[in-house]
Amino acid sequence: MADNLISVTGLSKQFESGDQHVTVLRELSVHLGRGESLALTGPSGSGKSTLLNVLCGLESPGSGRLAMLGQPLAGDGAPTGKALERAWCELRQSRLGVVFQDANLMPTLSLLDNIRLRARLAGRDDTSAGNWLQRLGIGELGQRYPDQVSGGQRQRAALAMVFVTRPALILADEPTGSLDRRTAETVADELFELQARHGCGLVLATHDADLAARCLHQLDLGHQGRP
Ligand SMILES: Nc1ncnc2c1ncn2[C@@H]1O[C@H](COP(=O)(O)OP(=O)(O)OP(=O)(O)O)[C@@H](O)[C@H]1O
Ligand SMILES: [Mg+2]
């Protein structure tokens, strides 16, 4: 496995809004090694989610070089077209664990079946699904459907979906954002425990200064997203 999980150099990203170009990320460089953690901080609109979306292939970088887990994905040596899409899909299927601001669970499956399915898709054993729900404090909700639980409970189920695949790198957008203080601490403990035990990388976007301080590195995006 590559020692450099993330290698980003000179990354910029613009959005078009009407006839305006809004530069969200400017000449950004980010490097993350195995077992390291990085907190993305900054005010609302500063570009934290945009950067995470670029790092998981849901947004293309406007310019700059990007390599994930040693594989070039933008700039020199990167594939293009279908080959690029395939490369991102393979990464997301088993090696990248992504937790979005809106937990992306399948509405027609119970929480437990969502997690089992995710494990199987990643080629992992699905027998620990219930155990992860337990550890995240929602063990008794496994048979419920996503619309039968709260936003914070959905978010924890989405985290269990990531944990069960044991990814090389976790990208999490405000993983504790909709949780009360105590539950947020439990979830953060699990995140950092998993990271320490498996040596995976972690990038999280957060408004929580205590959570950010638990990460090895912090990157303040400041006012990057302001026009
Ligand atoms: N698809 C898009 N088209 C145009 N502008 C966009 C798009 N997505 C995001 N933006 C703009 O880019 C900027 C950065 O947004 P982003 O969601 O990355 O911020 P954030 O730091 O995650 O904020 P928050 O803390 O509120 O989650 C904002 O000004 C936002 O309005
Ligand atoms: Mg965001």
Image (cartoon, rainbow, N blue to C red):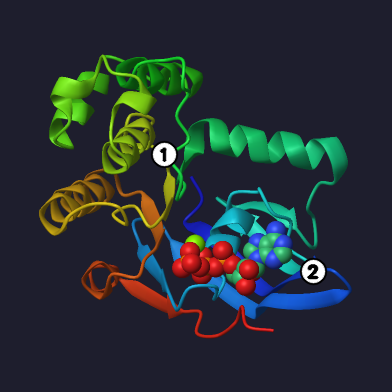
Indicate the quadrant where residue 111 lies.
top left
Mark 1 C-beta closer than 8 Å to ligand 2: no
Q: Amino acid at mark 1?
A: Pro
Q: Amino acid at mark 2?
A: Ser
Q: Farthest left residue?
A: 182
Crowding at dot 2, Cα within 10 Å, few <14 / some 14-19 / many 20+, comes out as: few
Numbered tag placed on residue 15 in the rendering: none
Numbered tag placed on residue 167 in the rendering: 1
Coordinates of residue 189 in the picture (x, y in percent): 16, 52
Indicate the quadrant where residue 149 lies.
top left
Quarter containing the C terminus: bottom right
Upstream in sequence: badge 2 or badge 1: 2
Q: Is residue 84 left or right of residue 108?
A: right
Crowding at dot 1, Cα within 10 Å, few <14 / some 14-19 / many 20+, comes out as: many
Local secondary structure at mark 1: loop
Coordinates of residue 119 in the picture (x, y in percent): 40, 22
Mark 2 C-beta closer than 8 Å to ligand 1: yes
Relative to 96, residue 32 above or below: below
Identified at 54% across, 76% down, the residue is 46
Identified at 83% across, 35% down, the residue is 82
Coordinates of residue 4 in the picture (x, y in percent): 50, 59
Indicate the quadrant where residue 77 lies.
bottom right
- What residue is disc 2 on? 17
Q: Is residue 135 left or right of residue 102?
A: left
Identified at 36% across, 17% down, the residue is 116
Q: Nearer the viewer, mark 2 or mark 1?
A: 2
Relative to 169, residue 166 above or below: above
Relative to 104, residue 100 above or below: below
Q: Is residue 80 left or right of residue 35?
A: right
Identified at 81% across, 46% down, the residue is 79
Local secondary structure at mark 2: strand
